[in-house]
C-alpha cells in the first residue's frame, strides 16, 4: 500500500502492483488487480488488433453463425445482417471500455467499482469470474479437444488434457505472454480459416430457405446472440490495455480493440452461417462436419487452428476470470496470487468441460445468455460514466465507498428482462410464450431498464464517501 499526501483535505491512497515485470515474457506476472506503476507501462494500440482477433478464430464463433440459420430460422442474407448489427454493437462498447485502461491502469472489474461501489461490485465481478474462468473455459476447451480428436484420433479426454494444460500454462505466466501468444497464433489462424472459407462458400447454398421461418423474432434472437458473443469480451476490456502509458491515444486503443473483435466475429460467424446452408445442424456435435468437405491438408490446418483458437480464447478467459476474482476483496497474501487463482480456475473449468465432452450442443444456451447479465452491467457503467463525466479513480480502492444504485439497477434489469423476455430451450418467458414473433429481447430490455433505474437511483441517493484518490507513487 502506497500513500501520497497530495491535498490537505484528501487522503490519497492506492494499491500498487508489487514486483518487477516490465516487458518480460518468460516470467510470471506478479500481483493481482492492483494499479500498474508508470515505470512498468508498455505496449502499443496496434498490438490489440491480434490480441482480440485471435481469440475469435475458434469453433464457438463459427457455431453462432450456424445457429442463426438452423436454430433461429434466418436466411443467409438475414443472418449476415443480424451478425453485423449485433457484433458491431458489442464491439463498439468493447472499444469504449478498452480506452479507459491506460488512463486508470487497472483491470476492468476494478473500474466497475466506480459504478457499483467497492462491495456492490461483487455482483458483476463474481458473475464474470464464474462465466469467464469456468463457463467460457469449458465451452472452448471442448471444441478444441474435439478438433484434436478429429485431427489425431486420440482419446477425447487425452485431447482435453492437452488443451487445458496449454491454456493454464500461458495464463499462469500472465499479461505479456498472453499478448505474445495471440500475435504468434494470428497468422496461422487467418491463413487456415481463409483457406477453409474458399471450400465452405464453394459448397454453400446461400439462397436456400432455412429449415424454419424465424421472422422478426428469429432476427432479434440472432442479434442478441451475436451481440452477446461480442460483448462477452467487454468485462475483460481494460485488462489488456492497463499496461499502456496514460498518454496513449485513446481513439487508437478503442479502434484496434473494437475492430479486432468486430472483424473476427463477423468473418467467422458468416462462415458458420454459410456452412449451415449446406451442412445443416445434423452432426454438428463437433468441428468434424464443418471441415468434412475440405481437402485433407486444408482440413487438418483448420482443425489445428480450431484447437489453437480455443487456447487463444481461453488464456484470456482464465486470466480475466482470475482477475475478476481478485477484485472481490478476498485477500490472498501471496506475491503470485493471480497465477494461483488462474490455476484453480483452469482445473475447475477442466471438470466442467469433461462433463460436456460428448455433447457440445448442451452449451448452446450458454452462448445465447451471456448478454443477459452484460446488458444491465453495461447500462450501469455507461450511464454512470455519462453522469460523472470525469476521472473517478478516487473510488477504486476505497473499501468504504458505496454506490447502491449500481447493484440494484443491474439486479432489477436482469430480473425484469429475464423473467419477461427470455426465450431459451429451458425457459420461455411470458412475452415470447404469448407473442412468439417478438423473439428474445432480454438484452435490449435489460439494458434499458437498468439504465433508467440507475439514473433515477443515482439522482435520488447518489453515492457515499468521496473516497481516496488514485495516484502513482
Image (cartoon, helix red, strand yellow):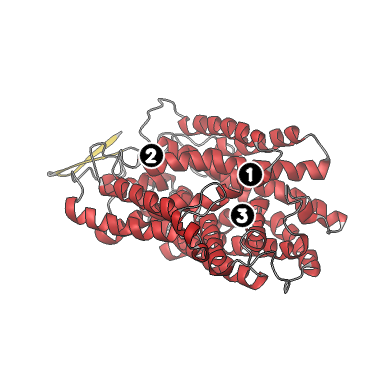
Q: For mark 2, does the 10 Å Cα neighbourhood hold few (<14), some (14 to 19), or many (20 or more) residues? A: many
Q: Residue furthest left?
A: 8
- Marked residue nearer the N-terminal end (3 or 2): 2
Relative image position of residue 313 (x, y in whole percent): 60, 47
Q: Quadrant of residue 209?
A: bottom right
- Marked residue nearer the N-terminal end (2 or 1): 2
SS of the residue at dot 2? Answer: loop
- Residue position marked by numbered label 3 in the rendering: 56
Q: Quadrant of residue 39?
A: top left
Give the spatial CA distance, label 2 vs label 1.
37 Å
- Residue position marked by numbered label 1 in the rendering: 362
Figure quadrant of the C terminus = top left
Can residue 35 be seen here? The reply is no
Can residue 407 be seen here? The reply is yes
Nearest to viewer (mark 2 / mark 1): 1
- Up the image or down, 437 lies above or below 25; here it is below
Nearest to viewer (mark 3 / mark 2): 3
Q: Are marks 2 and 1 in contact (CB under 8 Å)?
A: no
Q: For mark 3, does the 10 Å Cα neighbourhood hold few (<14), some (14 to 19), or many (20 or more) residues? A: many
- Residue position marked by numbered label 2 in the rendering: 34
Residue for point 19% across, 51% down = 462
Q: Residue furthest top?
A: 333
Q: Residue furthest right?
A: 296
Figure quadrant of the N terminus = top left
- Up the image or down, 460 lies above or below 28; here it is below
Query: In front here: 48 or 352?
Result: 352
Amino acid at each position: 500500500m502506497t500513500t501520497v499526501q497530495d491535498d490537505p483535505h484528501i487522503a490519497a491512497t492506492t494499491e500498487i502492483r508489487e514486483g518487477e515485470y516490465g516487458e518480460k515474457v518468460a516470467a510470471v506476472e506478479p500481483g493481482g488487480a492492483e494499479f500498474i506503476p508508470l515505470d512498468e507501462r508498455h505496449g502499443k494500440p496496434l498490438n490489440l488488433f491480434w490480441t482480440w482477433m485471435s481469440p475469435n478464430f475458434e469453433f464457438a464463433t463459427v457455431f453462432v453463425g450456424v445457429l442463426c440459420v438452423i436454430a433461429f430460422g434466418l436466411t443467409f442474407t438475414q443472418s449476415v445482417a443480424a451478425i453485423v448489427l449485433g457484433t458491431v454493437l458489442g464491439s463498439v462498447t468493447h472499444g469504449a471500455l478498452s480506452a479507459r485502461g491506460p488512463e486508470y491502469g487497472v483491470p476492468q472489474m476494478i473500474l466497475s467499482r466506480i459504478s457499483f461501489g467497492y462491495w456492490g461490485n461483487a455482483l458483476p465481478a463474481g458473475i464474470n469470474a464464474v462465466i469467464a474462468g469456468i463457463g467460457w473455459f469449458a465451452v472452448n476447451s471442448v471444441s478444441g479437444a474435439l478438433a484434436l480428436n478429429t485431427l489425431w484420433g486420440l482419446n477425447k479426454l487425452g485431447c482435453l488434457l492437452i488443451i487445458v494444460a496449454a491454456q493454464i500454462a500461458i495464463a499462469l505466466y500472465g499479461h505479456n505472454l498472453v499478448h505474445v501468444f495471440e500475435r504468434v497464433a494470428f497468422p496461422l489462424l487467418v491463413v487456415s480459416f481463409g483457406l477453409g472459407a474458399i471450400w465452405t462458400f464453394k459448397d454453400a447454398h446461400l439462397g436456400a430457405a432455412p429449415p424454419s421461418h424465424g421472422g422478426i423474432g428469429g432476427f432479434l434472437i440472432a442479434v442478441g446472440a451475436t451481440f452477446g458473443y461480442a460483448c462477452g469480451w467487454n468485462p475483460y476490456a481494460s485488462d489488456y490495455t492497463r499496461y499502456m502509458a496514460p498518454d496513449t491515444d485513446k481513439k487508437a486503443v478503442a479502434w484496434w480493440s473494437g475492430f479486432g473483435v468486430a472483424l473476427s466475429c463477423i468473418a467467422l460467424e458468416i462462415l458458420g452461417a454459410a456452412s449451415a446452408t449446406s451442412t445443416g445442424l445434423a452432426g454438428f456435435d463437433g468441428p468434424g462436419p464443418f471441415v468434412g468437405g475440405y481437402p485433407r491438408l486444408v482440413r487438418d490446418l483448420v482443425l489445428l487452428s480450431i484447437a489453437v483458437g480455443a487456447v487463444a480464447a481461453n488464456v484470456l478467459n482464465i486470466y480475466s476470470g482470475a482477475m475478476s476474482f481478485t477484485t472481490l476483496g478476498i485477500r490472498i497474501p501471496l506475491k503470485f496470487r493471480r497465477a494461483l487463482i488462474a490455476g484453480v480456475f483452469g482445473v475447475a473449468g477442466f471438470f466442467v468441460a469433461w462433463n460436456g465432452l460428448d455433447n457440445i450442443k448442451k452449451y448452446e444456451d450458454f452462448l445465447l445468455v451471456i448478454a443477459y447479465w452484460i446488458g444491465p452491467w453495461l447500462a450501469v457503467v455507461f450511464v454512470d460514466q455519462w453522469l460523472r463525466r470525469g476521472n473517478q479513480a478516487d473510488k477504486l480502492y476505497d473499501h468504504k465507498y458505496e454506490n447502491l444504485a449500481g447493484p440494484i439497477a443491474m439486479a432489477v434489469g436482469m430480473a425484469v428482462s429475464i423473467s419477461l423476455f427470455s426465450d431459451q430451450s429451458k425457459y420461455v418467458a411470458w412475452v415470447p410464450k404469448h407473442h412468439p414473433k417478438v423473439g428474445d429481447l432480454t438484452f435490449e430490455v435489460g439494458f434499458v431498464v437498468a439504465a433508467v433505474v440507475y439514473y433515477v437511483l443515482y439522482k435520488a441517493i447518489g453515492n457515499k464517501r468521496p473516497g481516496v484518490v488514485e495516484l502513482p507513487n
